[in-house]
Amino acid sequence: AQLPRVVLSPRGTLKAKALAEAFPGNVVIAKSNQEVVDAAECVIVAVLFKQVNEVFGALKFREEQKVMTLTAGLMPTRLKELCAPATTCVSAIPLPPVAKRSGASLLTPRLPWAEAMLKVCGSCVVVETEAEFKRLLVITCMMGDFYKRQLTAQQWLGSHGISEADAASWVAATFATFAADSAGAQVDTFQKLVEEQTPGGLNEMVWKAR
């Protein structure tokens, strides 16, 4: 299938140039943000929250356009105000592994075109209200803690004579295995996995000591 044409903002010069070189004919770099908006049927805005008013204030949208923001804290209600007269607006938070098509994204509200886009990059959890979206977003703050735990485990193994390479490989593999066991979790999945730990065993001792 033919890849869609993507028009990039000139703001991220190095990344935009790299994408244009990697996908010649499909990715082009606009001369301005307004040129992006003028050319696109669907506009994706990914800027820092503190840049929102500056970026949107200089843009004029069309009523029929679809607009998706990846800015944490920018909800659809406010997005509609910023990009009026466009009203087809969603907020999404894709986590970094979407670059490998194995990440998860959070989306509100449920609109088929937005959900379809995000599912190309991995899984997508959709909620209808901004309150639910904000609550679920809190969980993403555990990402740094997750990686720090891996780093600590690697360093501990290294301090006990394990090579850095072997330590990194084993820590990555074990954490991936833990996650794989709970992938596609149902309501009681996590409870069952906790209960499966051997009574009196090391795994149970660790979580009981927390």
Image (cartoon, rainbow, N blue to C red):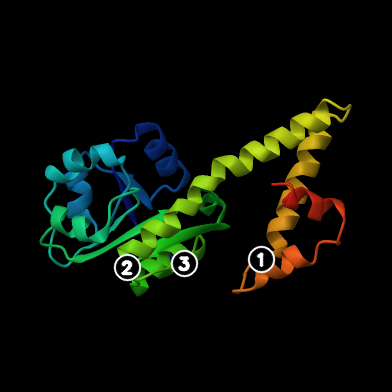
The residue located at (71%, 33%) in the rendering is 152
Quarter residue 110 falls in: bottom left
Q: Which residue is mark 2?
A: 129
Up/down of 49 relative to 177, above or below: above
Q: Residue 181: x and y, percent?
A: 72, 64
The residue labelled by disc 3 is 125
- Is residue 42 visible in this depiction of the protein? no
According to the picture, the residue beneath numbered tag 1 turns out to be 190
Kind of residue at disc 2: Thr
Decide which of 168, 33 is in the foreground and name it. Answer: 168
Alpha carbon separation for disc pair 2 and 1: 25 Å
Residue plotted at (44% across, 38% down): 18
**Relative to 183, does residue 60 appear above or below in the rendering?**
above
Can you tell which mark lies on residue 131? none
- The vertical placement of 42 against 20, above or below, is below
Amino acid type at circle 1 is: Phe
Quick check: can you spot residue 171? yes
Q: Is residue 37 above or below residue 193?
A: above
Sequence-earlier tag: 1 or 3: 3
Q: Residues within 10 Å of mark 1 (few under 14, many from 20)?
A: few
